[in-house]
């Protein structure tokens, strides 16, 4: 179908959709917040899809994502470091780089000549979890 916009040298139209509820916390919400801020402060550049709008978006997005509270985090690595007593477990609990609180595992049912996810699940049900069974479900 030949669109009139294409005949006039326009390639398409961008429509910004604002859902009734905010995105779930994490990267989606950060992306939404950065985009909303840029639409307020760089309306013309965003409307025209100017390269500086993309640069500003990614600079702001990754700047907000990669902070991770570094100042608060350093004490886990520096306290008792001279004694080689690093606080890795405490740091991992506090840091939570990947927020997996609301995530659920998905296991793909697969039957092949060398591997069976259903077989691993049956073993897991009968014998309980162990390292080998849990790793067998990873792929």
Image (tube, rainbow, N blue to C red):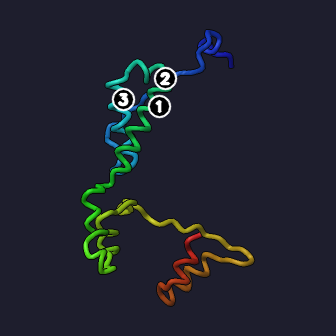
Q: Position of residue 89 (x, y in %)?
A: 33, 75
The residue at 34%/32% (across/down) is 36
Mark 3 — residue?
38
In the drawing, does residue 92 fall left or right of residue 47? left
Q: Which is more N-terminal, label 1 or label 3?
A: 3
Q: Could you tell me which residue is drawn at 33 percent across and 79 percent down?
A: 84
What secondary structure is found at the residue carrying circle 2? loop
Q: Are marks 1 and 2 in contact (CB under 8 Å)?
A: yes
How far is mark 2 from mark 3, CA to CA?
Answer: 12 Å
Q: Residue 122: give x, y in percent of width and height.
A: 56, 83
Location of the N terminus (image quadrant): top right
Is residue 57 placed above or below 106 in the rendered structure?
A: above
Q: Judging from the image, what secondary structure is the residue with disc 3 in?
A: helix
Can you tell which mark lies on residue 54? 1
Q: Quadrant of residue 8?
A: top right
In the rendering, at what x and y percent does residue 7 appear?
Answer: 65, 11
**Is 80 on the left or on the right of 35, as rendered?**
left
Query: Is residue 6 rendered to the left or right of residue 35?
Result: right
C-alpha gap between disc 3 and disc 1: 10 Å
Question: Closer to the N terminus: mark 2 or mark 3?
Answer: 3
Q: Which residue does the image show at 59% across and 13% down from the upper left? A: 5
63 left or right of 117? left
Circle 1: element type: helix
The relative height of residue 12 versus residue 113 in the rendered view (above or below) is: above
Report the quarter where the C terminus lies.
bottom right
Q: Residues within 10 Å of mark 2 (few under 14, many from 20)?
A: few
Residue named by callout 2: 50
């Amino acid at each position: 179908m030949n669109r009139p916009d294409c005949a006039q040298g326009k390639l398409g139209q961008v429509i910004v959709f604002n859902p009734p509820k905010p995105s779930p916390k994490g990267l989606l919400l950060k992306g939404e917040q950065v985009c909303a801020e840029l639409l307020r402060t760089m309306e013309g550049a965003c409307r025209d899809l100017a390269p500086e709008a993309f640069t500003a978006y990614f600079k702001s997005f990754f700047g907000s994502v990669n902070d991770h509270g570094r100042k608060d985090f350093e004490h886990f690595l520096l306290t008792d470091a001279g004694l080689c007593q690093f606080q890795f477990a405490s740091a991992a609990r506090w840091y939570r780089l990947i927020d997996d609180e609301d995530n659920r595992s998905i296991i793909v049912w697969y039957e092949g000549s060398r591997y069976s996810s259903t077989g691993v699940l049956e073993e897991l049900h009968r014998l309980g979890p162990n390292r080998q069974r849990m790793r067998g479900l990873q792929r």
